[in-house]
Image (spheres, rainbow, N blue to C red):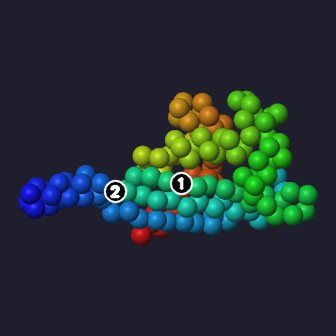
Amino acid sequence: MKKLLMLALAFVLCACGGGAVTKGSVEYKFSDYNTGAEQFVNVSVELEDGKITKVEIDETYDHNGEKTTKKTLGADYNMKPASPIGKEWNEQIAFLEEALVGTDGTIEIDEAGYPTNEDVKAGCTINLFNISAAVKEAVNNAE
């Protein structure tokens, strides 16, 4: 009975235990292309065996003279009217975060910074130039 219990415990531990989990983050600095103001993309990732299991992306934003983040603003960022898919920035980033799970963090973009992958474009049409660089840097920083 004792051997059977030990065998069952070993099986559970092997089944639940995957590869090494690593975490990385970055505060990626860039200049806003409209105003030239200093802004940041903040990314944190968790990886297992080099694949993202969790990712959080947010971007600083100057809202009426106060720094906040686009996720914090939610609908107050007011991207929905200009969005070809009718989604706010935070909704598109939530879609992208989900799409990145299981990948190495590579985001395929064109020379202007927009997603080229049809699956990503279905839920995220924002410019990803700085975001893709920040995600890749966070993945590279993972320890």
Residue type marked 1: Val
- Who comes first in sequence, dot 1 or dot 2? 2
Label 2 belongs to which residue? 49
Count the marks: 2
Q: Residue at x 72, y 52 (%)?
A: 71
Q: Nearer the viewer, residue 34 or 120?
A: 120
Q: Residue at x 74, y 31 (%)?
A: 86
Secondary structure of residue under mark 2: loop
Please determine whether, in this image, residue 122 is positioned above or below residue 89: above
Residue type marked 2: Asp
Label 1 belongs to which residue? 55
Q: Position of residue 37 (x, y in %)?
A: 81, 62
Asked if residue 131 lies left or right of residue 82, the reply is left
Identify the image quadrant of the C terminus.
bottom left
Q: Position of residue 35 (x, y in %)?
A: 84, 57
Asked if residue 143 lies left or right of residue 60, the reply is left
